Structures are given as C-alpha cells and as structure tokens.
Image (cartoon, coloured by chain):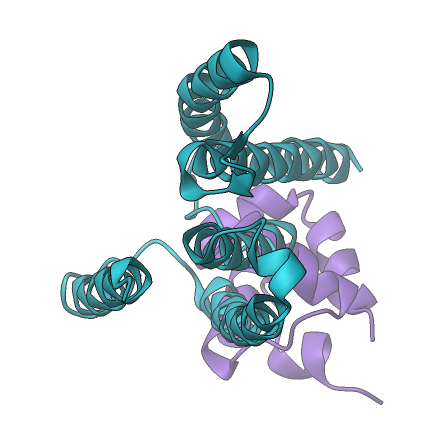
Chain colours: A cyan, B purple
Amino acid sequence: MDYSSIIILAVILVLAVLVWFATKYTGDQKGFDEMQLKKRGDAFRIGFFTLLACVFAMLVITSIESVSQKISVDFMLAASIMITVCVFGVYSIFAGAFFRMNENPKTYLGICFAVILPNAVVLIGELKKSGTLLKDGKLTFTPGGNLLNVLTFLIIGIAVIIKMVANSREERE
Amino acid sequence: MKNLKMKAARAAKDMSQEQLADACGVSRQTISAIEKGDYNPTVNLCIAICKALGKTLNDLFWED
C-alpha cells in the first residue's frame, strides 16, 4: 500500500497546527485591523470549504479508473491545496486583508517572482527533455508540483498587481 | 449603504483616506470599505473616526 498521500496529509496537518499556534501565541495577527481580521476569517472559512470540495472531488476522480491511471493522488492532493491557497489569497487580496497595514505589496510580488522563476526553469527543462509532463503516462507530483507552483503564484501575483492598480486609482479619487 | 456623511466630513477636513486611516490606526482599505458601506465598523472604530474628524457619533453614523 502506498502511504505517501497519508504522510503528505499528516505533514500538512502538523504544519497547519504549528501555524495556528504560531499565529495565536506570537501575536502574528498584529498589524491587521478589525476589518482585515474579519475578512481574513471569511477567507479562511471559504478556503476550508474549498479544500473540502476539492478533497471530495478528488475522491470522486480517483474512483474513475480511466482518470486515476493518468493523474496520481499526490498531484491531486497538491492541486487541492494549491487551489485552496489561491482562493484564500485572491479573496483576501481583493478584500484588502492580505497585507498588513503599511505593508508594501511589492514585497509579495518579489516572493511570487522568486517562486515562479525556479519552478518555471525546472518545468521548461522537463518539457525540453521529455516533451511531456507525464511520467509513464501519469501526471505525478514531480514535475506536476512545479506546474502547480507556477500557476498558483502567477494567479496570486496577478491579483496583487490588479489590487495595487485599483488601490492607486482609488487613492487618486 | 454608503456612508456619505463620513466622506463629506473627511473631505471638509481636507483629509485623504490614508491620513484618516493613520489617525484611526486602521488600513486605508478599511476607511474605504466603511465609506462604501461594505463594512460595519465596531463602536471603538466609530469613536476613533469621530474623534479624528471632530464629529459626534450621531453626526456620522446615525441614520435619520
């Protein structure tokens, strides 16, 4: 039996608990005002239900044999998490609750670029080498994970840029 | 519902959303959301806004 999916899920759960403790007891929520905290709460709730929906969809998809032979469970699990990250990120960015007060959104653009660049290099390298992202006819976490990273941070980066433009337009009015 | 009274009071004091936000200790997005009627502030924030704009709660937040 392949335990890799269960191990990945367990690691994610442990990380989630650690992040929760870190934010609760280290005052990481400082720097967000009351509206931002409320909107972030909404974003976390929407993210939670998105993850539930994705996991449910994953269970349905894995039960279809023709699809499960082409996409690995690892990739689907990672895709579920990345979709959740996207939903949380984009919702809170547009709600004005992603960045702390007086925080420069350009820093996040730098982070997005720093994540996209190495992943894109690996992805392009893989495509040049084998001409496909499939390994033995199956889309797996490696290099599928690179594709997910590129897409996620590209979406978040674009959302940041749109929000920055909207903010500067609003400030001028 | 848009809070036009607050927007008018801010404009009368020649303050930008950013300046009002700094005076109240919140983000500019929060001031914008209150003015647009997208967010209902807590009483504490209402009081901070009133103090910054030199108005009363009735002046800015009471619907006639």
A7 on left or right of A55: left
Could you say where residue A123 lies in the image, as x and y percent from the top left? 50, 21
Could you say where residue A108 lies in the image, as x and y percent from the top left? 45, 32
Q: Quadrant of the C terminus of chain A?
A: top right
Q: Quadrant of the N terminus of chain A?
A: bottom left
Residue B16 figure quarter: top right
Residue drawn 19% across and 66% down?
A14
Residue farthest to the left, as pictured: A25
Query: Does residue A10 lie above or below B10 as drawn?
Result: below
Could you say where residue A138 lies in the image, as x and y percent from the top left? 53, 42
A122 on left or right of A165: left
Residue A132 figure quarter: top right
Could you say where residue B62 lies in the image, as x and y percent from the top left? 73, 86
Query: Does residue A138 lie above or below A8 as drawn?
Result: above
Total numbered circles:
0
Residue A131 figure quarter: top right
Residue drawn 78% across and 69% down?
B3
Residue drawn 45% across and 67% down?
A37
